[in-house]
Image: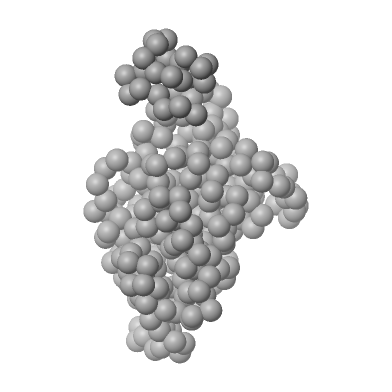
Amino acid sequence: MADKSQSCDHKCSSCSSCNDGSCHEPTAKEIRFLAQMANIKHKILVLSGKGGVGKSTVAVNLAISLAMEGRRVGLLDVDIHGPSIPTMMGLKGSHTEFANDCIIPPEVAGIKVISVDFFLENTDDALIWRGPMKQGAIQQFLEDVEWGELDFLIIDCPPGTGDEPLSVRQILKGDTRAVVVTTPQEVAAADVRKSINFCEKLDLPVIGVIENMSGFACPHCGTITNIFKQGGGETLAAKAKVPFLGRIPIDPLVAECSDAGVPMVHKYPESAMAKAFASIIQPLLALPEE
């Protein structure tokens, strides 16, 4: 498609797009979407090339940590086939409401949350969807949800570099950044490199790498013990020339909190994990406004 002139008013002959018919008046829906996205300062994808690295746990606790700093936060779950955000946020079985042709997301701890789970009659049903259906659902989550004014929209993606993160990037175009999650082991870091390559190919800026499950935090004294190899995330970040945001220790209370629907950093704000997140979010808080 030919490039439009920056001064194009969709009526003039100043650009080739108008002449070849590819330029069109923006629809009311497109105008509303652009206005809505302009009200969200930062859209951040949480990515990982490997399953089982605790990516959704990171997304939830990033959102909570930002909200605890007084920021306005939304949390979008685009893991269409395996959504876990509703359970972790205590919203299992919740549904959305509709008003003024918009989807009104449920809120918890001041965070607006959307997941495909909220639209299913039976959350145990398997969604056997191909790419176009997933893209349509993600587009609806971004276009039709009343997000309001937000400082951060945290977008939890499924593992890998498939339809979901690609759809988000294409819909939001240049107005996004990414956080990449790994664990210390080389087998995980090797797959996570693909996520960083994905970001490079799509010109998606990477805020940094988080090394999750890095050491064991004793629930009694808080001492961190390295029961697994350490440093895979930091090494990965150095090789990819992206920032290393920090390490998050394993804490047995994480599973308890996730099952109970109470994010760890919210219930245990003095834990080693909460303190790690408080440090990790500092580069996010320092991001320039779009």
Residue beneath the point at 36% across and 85% down: 224
Q: Quadrant of residue 173?
A: top left
Closer-to-camera residue (192/91): 192
Q: Tell me how many marks there are.
A: 0
Residue 258 x/y as whole percent = 53, 66
Residue beneath the point at 37% across and 77% down: 235
Q: Is residue 73 left or right of residue 122?
A: left
What's the coloring here? one colour
Q: Say if residue 26 shows up in the picture.
A: no
Residue beneath the point at 36% across and 17% down: 8
Q: Is residue 19 left or right of residue 91?
A: left
Closer-to-camera residue (113/173): 173
Above or below, 181 against 143 in this view is: below
Residue beneath the point at 45% across and 27% down: 2
Residue 69 x/y as whole percent = 29, 54
Q: Say if residue 240 shows up in the picture.
A: yes
Residue 14 x/y as whole percent = 36, 14
Above or below, 36 against 271 in this view is: above
Q: Quadrant of residue 230?
A: bottom left
Residue 290 x/y as whole percent = 29, 40
